[in-house]
Amino acid sequence: MILFHGSNVAVKEPHLLKGQRNLDFGKGFYTTSDFEQAAAWARRKTMLRGSGTPIVTYYNVNENDLLQLKTLRFLKADRAWLDYITSYRKGFALPDDYELIIGPVANDQTTQTLTLYLDGYLDAEGALKRLLTQRLKDQYTFRTAAGIALLRFCEEKNV
């Protein structure tokens, strides 16, 4: 399986960043199986950081090796997924020991809906109803060094 990571630099040797990050699944190394999603992340990171070049790094990972990892998988944007990502977006790290989390990505298209939900203008049912109309891409978040070690650098591409 090929996974992609978008950034303002090539990431040949991925690692965990220090500190808590208010992203969907908290601290971890984020990848996706969708090249266009990674390219969008690369362009956004380059713009926000004001340096570098939008680059998508490709990794090969053996799907059987992923079975070794303690994994939480969200098959769709449902209430459990919404509760999980909003806890991190509020800055509350959840007490779990998952090495890999797989699920839909709350991307730029979902920001308005999530903001309305977090601010109390939408209830969970209303937020999910809006989110289900969008074609959400996936994300694979590796949260341990053991998980990251399964990623094998393949190539990089400027986008």
Image (cartoon, grey):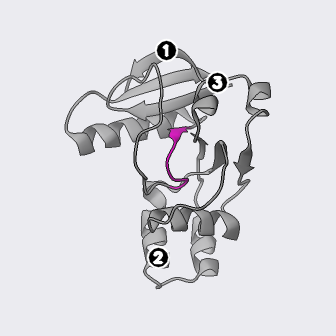
Cα–Cα span, label 3 and label 2: 35 Å
The amino acid on which the numbered mark 3 sits, given as a three-letter code, is: Leu
Q: Nearer the viewer, residue 99 or 64?
A: 99
Cα–Cα span, label 2 and label 1: 38 Å
The amino acid on which the numbered mark 2 sits, given as a three-letter code, is: Leu
The disc placed on residue 64 is: none
Q: Are marks 3 and 2 in contact (CB under 8 Å)?
A: no
Please provide percent x and percent y for residue 154: 54, 14
The residue that label 3 is drawn on is 150
Q: Is residue 26 located in the magenta-colored stretch of the structure?
A: yes
Please provide percent x and percent y for residue 108: 42, 55
Q: Quadrant of the N terminus?
A: top right
| SS at circle 3 | loop
The residue that label 1 is drawn on is 155
* Magenta highlight range: 24-31
The residue that label 2 is drawn on is 118
Is tag 2's residue or tag 1's residue first in the polypeptide sequence?
2
| SS at circle 1 | strand
Residue at image location 53% in from the left, 17% down from the top: 153
Is tag 1's residue or tag 3's residue first in the polypeptide sequence?
3
The amino acid on which the numbered mark 1 sits, given as a three-letter code, is: Glu
| SS at circle 2 | helix
Q: Is residue 145 visible?
A: yes
| Outermost residue, left side | 50
Q: Are marks 2 and 1 in contact (CB under 8 Å)?
A: no
Q: Nearer the viewer, residue 84 or 20?
A: 20
Q: Is residue 78 visible?
A: no
Is tag 3's residue or tag 2's residue first in the polypeptide sequence?
2
Residue at image location 42% in from the left, 52% down from the top: 21
